[in-house]
Amino acid sequence: MDKFLVSFIGLLMTVSGIIGTSLSDNLATLGELVDPEIEVDDTELTEIQSWTSQCGGEVLVNVDSFGAVGDGVSDDTQAFVSAWNKACSTPKSVFLVPIGRRYLVNATSFIGPLVIQMDGTIVAPDEPKNWDPKFQRIWLGFTILEGVIFQGSGVIDGSGSKWWAASCKRNKTNPCNGAPTALTIDSSSGVKVKGLTFRNSQQIHFTIARSDSVLVSEVLIIGPEDSPNTDGIHIVESTNVVIQKTKIGTGDDCISIIDSSTSIKMKKIYCGPGHGISIGRLGKNNATDFVSHVVLDTAFLKDTTNGVRIKTWQGGSGYARAIRFENVRMEDVENPIIIDQFYCDSPTTCKNQTAAVEISQIWYRNISGTTKSELAMKFACSDTVPCTKIVLSNINLVKTDGTAQTYCHSASGFSYGTVQPSADCLSSDQDLLIDQLKDANAEDEEPRIDTLFTLSSHPFMPTVMKGYDP
Ligand SMILES: *[C@@H]1O[C@H](CO)[C@@H](O)[C@H](O)[C@H]1NC(C)=O
Ligand SMILES: *[C@@H]1O[C@H](CO)[C@@H](O)[C@H](O)[C@H]1NC(C)=O
Ligand SMILES: *[C@@H]1O[C@H](CO)[C@@H](O)[C@H](O)[C@H]1NC(C)=O
Ligand SMILES: *[C@@H]1O[C@H](CO)[C@@H](O)[C@H](O)[C@H]1NC(C)=O
Ligand SMILES: *[C@@H]1O[C@H](CO)[C@@H](O)[C@H](O)[C@H]1NC(C)=O
């Protein structure tokens, strides 16, 4: 496993090396992400090849050899579990889901470490009534993985339509029960997921929870616009996560980041339909959450209900800070830029409270496109804990009838460069304005905000090496 780990780390380093350098990729490239054929960096291909050759002589543990039928109808759960156990007890083994077949697999919990080559389709039984209640929120659950790669052209198909119909969001007479997440990676580190496709998950497609150093690359997620709670990638209490070259169209957030998650980099993301890229919900049930060092760089959002969003519940505490959204193009987005500290996703109305998650150091840079609603930018912050240090630069969000505007409530910060619609409603952060305003008219020169942004003074660099010193 050692060589594999080294090359995996090399790969992560390559990725983190890209971060901070300016991107030459333009929108045209992102537009092509509609096509699942996503371009791969040469560097990365080389790394993958070297990994493959290192693993060339390793033991393939094929689920077919353990009695998997692969007709999409026979229950292959036991074959998967047996193959997994065999692979786990065999050094240098690769767990193989072969191409060209469809495997019906019931809710299962796998415990690592392993390499997973997934080329076939894994499909969930479609009847919620028969689902094992022990696995209410899990379909394919992987825990305690270390240095594992999931790769291949395989499809994870949640067969979610009956679950959606049973959702209380579809029909208020239904009880509000949770439904399974298609793939969960929990309490793991050094995990890479590359090339897989997720379809029609029961609820969330892919959750990364309580994990460190996770790279997700070239993943495709497809769910219908009206499928309830089907977030694309859901990051929970995790650190050093990179999501890149990924295309997501679904019925909820394309990416959501919650609980105490830090050092999250999203790069080259296509989102739509869906609810946009969300930090939060934070602070639900008076929770204390700390989210910082999040970057979204280069994204294209189309026909989404939100663009880049931070959402918190009333009554929470902690903070969301040092967050940067940049180089984003939006097309027909309902709320392109939004901070909502009055978020309430509950059948009953939520009371306003004095406690709130503190939002500060949020930087929006080079964001353009079309808004569907008048409120191109909305900063709705807590009365008692205002948002501070909101910085806008080079924003151009238009509505066809020319009525785009900015809403501010309890929010301060400043803008420089072209900002359309204007954000004059942000009350100025006096202490921020010392030198900045002098530079505000100098188009080429950015205000010196490095003192405000840990992000810009230290280029984002996930500490992927943690625990992997070779
Ligand atoms: C899945 O597991 C449940 C509970 O053990 C069982 O009732 C159901 O028949 C299984 N479904 C399939 C397709 O194996
Ligand atoms: C909602 O569910 C109830 C009870 O199952 C059913 O009678 C009703 O027709 C459903 N409504 C819609 C809009 O599907
Ligand atoms: C959150 O705190 C408020 C104020 O202390 C309290 O009224 C409310 O019941 C709490 N909510 C929950 C879900 O604990
Ligand atoms: C602004 O963002 C767009 C969309 O991602 C990108 O094409 C363009 O190159 C960026 N401009 C600059 C100056 O970085
Ligand atoms: C909470 O406070 C906001 C801002 O002051 C206000 O717009 C909103 O109506 C209040 N909501 C409730 C439920 O009181």
Image (spheres, rainbow, N blue to C red):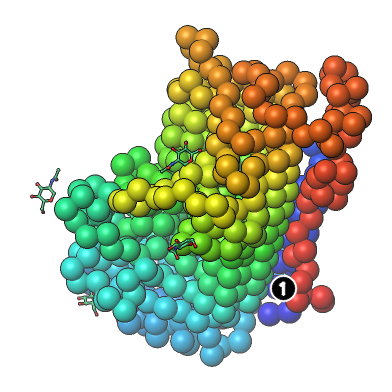
Q: Nearer the viewer, residue 10 or 322?
A: 322
Q: Quadrant of residue 470?
A: bottom right
Seen in the image, is 203 located left or right of residue 208? left
Quarter the N terminus occupies: bottom right
Q: Is residue 279 visible?
A: yes
Identity of the residue drawn at 53% across and 17% down: 404
Residue under label 1: 5
Q: Nearer the viewer, residue 24 or 62?
A: 24
Q: Nearer the viewer, residue 60 or 82?
A: 82
Seen in the image, is 139 located left or right of residue 441? left
- Dot 1 amino acid type: Leu
Classify mark 1: residues with Cα within 10 Å, few (<14), some (14-19) or many (20+): some
Identity of the residue drawn at 65% across and 42% down: 387
Give coordinates of residue 382: x percent, y percent.
57, 44
Vertically, is 270 above or below 8?
Answer: above
Give coordinates of residue 255: x percent, y percent.
52, 49
